[in-house]
């Protein structure tokens, strides 16, 4: 049985831990104690009682570490690594943005697997999560990627390797960057049905496309329209993580979801004024909160 440690007990971490615990030995590394995990999935309720650790000093070596924390909490996640990482342990970085490979330089690159996940989930309470639909996972091709995909063989999550991870990561970022409109309007996915808002979403995605192409991604012009349509087809009350964090007065991942487009665009001489403007507004509103 594969030994897996999931760092982070939020919506993504809790859902992955619950599914993986159905067939693997799972430990959840969390800030606060939990009794168990319950996830309302499209296929019914699943429960799990993984080992819960709250002290990095209590961690022991595992085969896989899955980091599912927010991007701004990488330092906190890194505190768990000395106890969890052995000579052959692999680290999967399951976070937003396109810079997963750079966030844990203390782990050898050949043992780090960047992960793109599309899994609409919401945490209602500690250990209590709603999974809106069966999700997808993409990782780079190779031995490590194939080993990671195998972890999910007994779950409903469709995990696959991809020969073009750069494109997959930037396509996900195109979806994520548009989600800032929900945070600023405090409306769930149904906000995409407002024509003026939909046009703002398209402008955000077009900037992402331009910068992503400069970074080597193969992104089509029609992606901007597709992102709007995908959002319209989502559950109307679906709340993305940027919206949820802002509404709760928490730190947000606006840097990894929007400002990264501005930063990497500047490297290529590409301006991204819409992402910069909306990210600045959200940051200012977050500071007030």
Image (cartoon, rainbow, N blue to C red):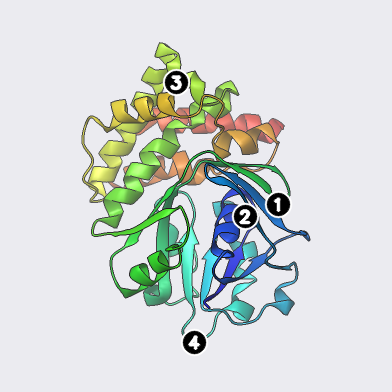
Residue underneath mark 2: 14
Tag nearer the camera, 4 or 1: 1
SS under mark 1: loop
In 3D space, how far apart are the residues under numbered discs 1 and 2 (Cα atoms)?
7 Å
Give residue 87's mark. Answer: 4
Res. 266 visible in picture: no
Tag nearer the camera, 3 or 2: 2
Among the two numbered marks 1 and 3 on one chain, the one whose residue lies closer to the N terminus = 1
* Quadrant location of the C terminus in the rendered image: top right
Q: Position of residue 271 (x, y in %)?
A: 32, 34
The answer to whether mark 1 and mark 3 are in CB contact below 8 A is: no
Count residues near mark 2 (Cα–Cα under 10 Å), then give few for <14, some for 14-19, many for 20+. Answer: many
Residue underneath mark 3: 192
Q: Residue at x 52, y 76 (%)?
A: 2
Left or right of 190? Residue 215 is left
Count residues near mark 3 (Cα–Cα under 10 Å), then give few for <14, some for 14-19, many for 20+. Answer: many
Residue underneath mark 1: 127
Say above or below: 163 vs 220.
below
């Amino acid at each position: 049985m594969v030994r897996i440690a999931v760092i982070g007990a939020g919506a993504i971490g809790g859902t992955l831990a619950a599914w993986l615990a159905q067939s693997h030995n799972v430990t959840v590394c969390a800030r606060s104690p939990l009794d168990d995990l319950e996830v309302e999935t499209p296929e019914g309720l699943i429960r799990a009682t993984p080992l819960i650790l709250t002290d990095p000093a209590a961690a022991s070596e595992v085969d896989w570490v899955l980091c599912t924390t927010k991007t701004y909490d990488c330092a906190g996640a890194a505190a768990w690594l000395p106890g969890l990482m052995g000579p052959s342990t692999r680290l999967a970085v399951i976070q937003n943005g396109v810079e997963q490979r750079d966030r844990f330089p203390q782990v050898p690159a050949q043992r780090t697997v960047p992960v793109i996940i599309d899994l609409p989930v919401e945490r209602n309470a500690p250990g209590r999560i709603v999974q809106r639909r069966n999700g997808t996972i993409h990782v780079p091709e190779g031995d490590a990627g194939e080993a990671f995909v195998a972890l999910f063989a007994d779950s409903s999550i469709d995990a696959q390797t991809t020969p073009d991870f750069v494109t997959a990561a930037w396509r996900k970022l195109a979806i994520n960057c548009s989600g800032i409109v929900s945070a600023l309007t405090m409306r769930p996915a149904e906000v995409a049905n407002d024509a003026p808002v939909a046009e703002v979403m398209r402008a955000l995605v077009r900037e992402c496309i331009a910068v992503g192409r400069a970074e080597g991604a193969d992104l089509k012009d029609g992606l901007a329209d597709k992102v709007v349509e995908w959002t319209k087809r989502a559950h109307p009350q679906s709340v993305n993580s940027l919206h949820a964090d802002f509404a709760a007065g928490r730190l947000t991942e606006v840097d990894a979801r929007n400002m990264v487009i501005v930063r990497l665009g500047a490297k290529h001489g590409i301006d991204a004024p819409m992402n910069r403007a909306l990210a600045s507004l959200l940051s200012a509103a977050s500071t007030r909160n």
